[in-house]
Image (tube, grey):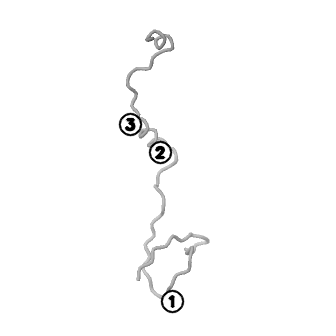
């Protein structure tokens, strides 16, 4: 039987958020995989900025206020 849980590491001990249906003192195999992206907040924000720029590319050069009024 395989259980996938998300425990909390506290005081040097992994503590499951819910009880496990296991007999007393069983041998188990444990794989520890930290959750999260591993990226810093700045790296995530930079990636989001890149996505926004790719999704909404600017069609051309920025026009000044005077240039915008001249286009009328």
Q: At 51% across and 85% down in the image, what residue appears?
A: 21
Say which of marks 2 and 3 sits in front: 3
Residue at numbered disc 1: 25
Q: Residue furthest front?
A: 72
Q: Residue at x 49, y 86 (%)?
A: 22
**Callout 1: few (<14), some (14-19), or many (20+) C-alpha neighbours within 10 Å?**
few
Using residue 66 as the reference point, say whether residue 55 is left or right of it.
left
Of discs 3 and 1, which sits in the foreground? 3
Query: Dividing the picture into quarters, in which one does residue 56 lie?
Result: top left
Q: Is residue 50 left or right of residue 9?
A: left
Position of the C terminus by quadrant: top left
Q: Residue at x 46, y 9 (%)?
A: 70
Dot placed on the residue nearer the N-terminal end, 3 or 1 = 1
Q: Quadrant of the N terminus?
A: bottom left
Asked whether the residues under the numbered discs 3 and 1 touch, taking CB atoms below 8 Å apart as contact, a structural biologist would say no
Residue that badge 2 annotates? 43
Q: Which residue is mark 3?
A: 54
Disc 2 is placed on an element classified as helix
Tag 2 near tag 1, CB within 8 Å? no
Give whichever of 57, 10 is nearer the camera.
57
- In three-dimensional space, the C-alpha distance between marks 2 and 3, rounded to whole angstroms, equals 17 Å
Return the disc, 2 or 3, that comes first in the chain's sequence. 2
**11, above or below 45, in the image:** below
Q: Secondary structure at mark 3?
A: helix
Q: In front: 27, or 51?
A: 51
User: What's the distance in space between the residues labelled 2 and 1, CA to CA?
Assistant: 43 Å
């Amino acid at each position: 039987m395989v259980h996938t849980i998300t425990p909390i590491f506290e005081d040097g001990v992994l503590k499951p958020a819910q009880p496990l249906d296991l007999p007393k003192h069983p041998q188990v195999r444990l794989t520890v995989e930290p959750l999260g992206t591993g990226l810093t907040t700045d790296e995530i924000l930079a990636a989001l900025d890149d996505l926004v720029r790719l999704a909404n590319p600017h069609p051309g050069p920025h026009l000044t206020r005077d240039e915008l009024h001249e286009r009328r």
